[in-house]
Image (cartoon, rainbow, N blue to C red):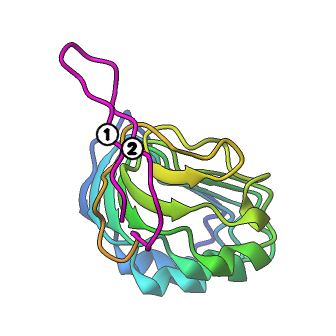
């Protein structure tokens, strides 16, 4: 029986393609670190079987689609690093019941909507997303303005990056 508790395939490797659903067969896995590779596509739902995970690192790939809501079901999860990918949509409300205390989603321009109050203390930052920071009442720099399912009927301020010929836009929805 193969027992891998800590799998680290990081930037020294250039592994690509879809995240393999077969990773779910490593049920004793505690740390999955795939940082800095070329993985693309959504997080397979089969990975919901990795309930022993303490740390999930998918940073700096091209993983896309919605953030996986099943992470809230991992009782030992402490750190979730999903920064520098292509995730989109809102932060899953299910994450409010998650056991982990820190997660990083910076650099995912397609993430949008208001960050739920229950997650704000655990969120590393908003940089490079379109998540709304209701404390500062700002839509953070770097994201998309029209991600389907995220815009609601409200007045939204969109800040553009400071570049020559940049503009400040104040649309009303």
Q: Nearer the viewer, residue 3 or 40?
A: 40
Could you classify mark 1 by the number of other residues whose Cα lies within 10 Å: few (under 14), some (14-19), or many (20 or more)? few
How far apart are the two marked residues, 2 and 1, measured between alpha carbons?
Answer: 6 Å
Q: Which residue is the site of mark 1?
A: 169
One can see residue 93 in this view: yes
Q: Give the label on residue 130, or none.
A: none
Residue 169 on the magenta segment: yes
- Left or right: where 122 falls relative to 149: right
Give the x, y percent position of residue 146. Answer: 28, 62
Q: Give the farthest residue toward the left.
A: 165
Give the x, y percent position of residue 157. Answer: 44, 46
Query: Which quarter of the rendering shows the N terminus?
Result: bottom right
Q: Nearer the viewer, residue 126 or 46?
A: 126
* Residue positioned 38% across, 61% down in the render: 87
Give the x, y percent position of residue 135. Answer: 72, 47
Camera-nearest label, 2 or 1? 1
Q: Give the farthest residue toward the front.
A: 172
Task: Please report the bounds of the magenta region as a residue range.
Answer: 151-173
- Looking at the picture, does residue 152 appear above or below residue 86? below
Give the x, y percent position of residue 82. Answer: 50, 53
Q: Tag 1 or tag 2, which sits nearer the N-term? A: 2
Dominant secondary structure of the residues highlighted in magenta in the image: loop
- Secondary structure of the residue carrying tag 1 is loop
- Left or right: where 173 falls relative to 3: left
> Tags 2 and 1 in contact by the CB under 8 Å rule?
yes
* Residue positioned 43% across, 37% down in the render: 141
Q: Nearer the viewer, residue 96 or 54?
A: 96
Query: Which quarter of the rendering shows the C terminus?
Result: bottom left
* Residue positioned 66% across, 81% down in the render: 94
Could you classify mark 2 by the number of other residues whose Cα lies within 10 Å: few (under 14), some (14-19), or many (20 or more)? many
- Secondary structure of the residue carrying tag 2 is loop
Q: Which residue is the site of mark 2?
A: 158
């Amino acid at each position: 029986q193969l027992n891998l508790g800590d799998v680290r395939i990081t930037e020294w490797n250039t592994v690509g393609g879809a995240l393999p659903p077969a990773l779910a067969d490593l049920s004793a896995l505690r740390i999955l670190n795939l940082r800095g590779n070329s993985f693309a596509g959504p997080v397979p739902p089969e990975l919901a079987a990795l309930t022993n995970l303490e740390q999930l690192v998918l940073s700096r790939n091209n993983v896309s689609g919605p953030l996986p809501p099943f992470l809230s079901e991992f009782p030992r999860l402490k750190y979730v690093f999903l920064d520098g990918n292509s995730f989109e949509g809102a932060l899953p409300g299910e994450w409010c019941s998650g056991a982990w205390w820190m997660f990083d989603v910076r650099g995912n321009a397609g993430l949008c909507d208001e960050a739920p109050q229950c997650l704000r203390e655990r969120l590393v930052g908003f940089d490079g997303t379109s998540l709304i920071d209701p404390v500062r009442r700002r839509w953070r720099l770097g994201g998309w303005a029209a991600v389907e399912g995220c815009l609601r009927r409200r007045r939204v301020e969109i800040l553009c990056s400071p570049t020559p010929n940049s503009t400040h836009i104040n649309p009303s929805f």
